[in-house]
């Protein structure tokens, strides 16, 4: 296992770090992931979460979708953790150029990160499917049944459901950032969700750092590997604002 000092040295010597993160980045904020022992996949519902969070299910059983969505996906009381804050600090210091995230919780921006590519959208944005009027996550949380716009249209969260494609502009921004990075930090992801997991193949830089509680298929290809919590590790990194 690699040391904290090795990670500190890589960060100190890097000029264009990109952070690629998954659900494990937010679990320390109390947001459950999908595949861990205490994640959403191991809880009991009438339908599996993967089915509920699909485009087909949203279209056919919209009320049932929203019952699950309000209960399990709208974690509006959760706060950023050490990982989120450290990444914002690295960006402010000119070390980190972008965060590419599979999460939809908005915690990177809440911690102060500016350049964030949300591959799967955000629960904080919701739009009427008819007139495109914007609605907040709190509006969705406080609504009953199927939330509807004043024009009568159904409101849909700006999240990428299963069976839906990723946003082209977000994808292009994320890939450009990764291709221009000299260091890629991959954290809190099993690297099994595609197409997002395929993004790391576009990295052309020097160093790949992998931080994840469990082993991943990519461990053998990374330069530094840490099997621990993302926030606990990154929280110990020292950011020198005189880089």
Image: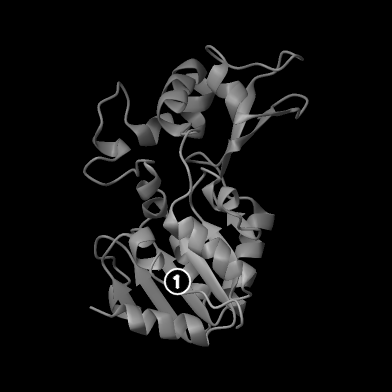
Q: Residue at x 24, y 40 (%)?
A: 38
Q: Position of residue 220 (x, y in %)?
A: 28, 78
Query: Is residue 223 visible in this depiction of the protein?
Result: no
**Relative to residue 56, is residue 25 depicted above or below?**
below
Q: Position of residue 49 (x, y in %)?
A: 36, 33
Q: Nearer the viewer, residue 57 or 125?
A: 125
**Relative to residue 85, is residue 44 depicted above or below?**
above
Q: Nearer the viewer, residue 71 or 193?
A: 71
Near mark 1 (Cα within 10 A), the count class, few <14, some 14-19 or many ≥20, is many
Q: Nearer the viewer, residue 171 or 8?
A: 8
Q: Position of residue 122 (x, y in %)?
A: 57, 42
Which quarter of the picture shows residue 153? top right
Quarter of the N terminus within the rendering: bottom left
- Would residue 113 appear left or right of 200 to someone viewing this image? right
- Would residue 20 appear left or right of 188 to someone viewing this image? right
Q: Residue at x 55, y 53 (%)?
A: 108
Q: Which residue carries the number 1 mark?
A: 185
Quarter of the C terminus within the rendering: bottom right
Q: Nearer the viewer, residue 52 or 34?
A: 34
Q: Residue at x 72, y 13 (%)?
A: 152
State the count of labels: 1
**Relative to residue 71, is residue 184 depicted above or below?**
below
Which quarter of the picture shows residue 225? bottom left
Query: Is residue 213 visible in this depiction of the protein?
Result: yes
Callout 1 secondary element: strand
Q: Position of residue 155 (x, y in %)?
A: 64, 24
Q: Residue at x 56, y 65 (%)?
A: 89
């Amino acid at each position: 296992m690699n040391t904290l000092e090795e990670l500190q040295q890589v960060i100190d010597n890097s000029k264009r770090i990109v952070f690629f993160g998954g659900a494990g980045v937010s679990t320390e904020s109390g947001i459950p992931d999908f595949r861990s022992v205490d994640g959403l996949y191991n809880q009991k519902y009438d339908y599996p979460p993967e089915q509920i969070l699909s485009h087909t299910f949203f279209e056919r059983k919209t009320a049932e979708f929203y019952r699950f969505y309000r209960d399990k996906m709208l974690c509006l009381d959760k706060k950023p953790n050490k990982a989120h804050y450290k990444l914002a600090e690295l960006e402010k210091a000119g070390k980190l150029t972008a965060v590419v995230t599979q999460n939809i919780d908005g915690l990177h921006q809440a911690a102060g990160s500016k350049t964030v590519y949300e591959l799967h959208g955000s629960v904080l944005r919701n739009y009427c499917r008819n007139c495109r009027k914007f609605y907040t996550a709190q509006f969705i949380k406080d609504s009953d049944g199927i939330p509807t716009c004043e024009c009568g249209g159904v409101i849909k969260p700006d999240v990428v459901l299963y069976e839906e494609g990723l946003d082209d502009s977000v994808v292009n921004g994320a890939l450009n950032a990764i291709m221009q990075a000299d260091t890629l930090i991959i954290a809190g992801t099993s690297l099994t969700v595609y197409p997002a997991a395929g993004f790391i193949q576009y990295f052309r830089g020097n160093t790949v750092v992998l931080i994840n509680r469990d082993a991943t298929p990519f461990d053998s290809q990374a330069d530094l590997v840490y099997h621990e919590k993302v926030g606990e590790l990154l929280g110990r990194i020292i950011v020198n604002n005189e880089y």
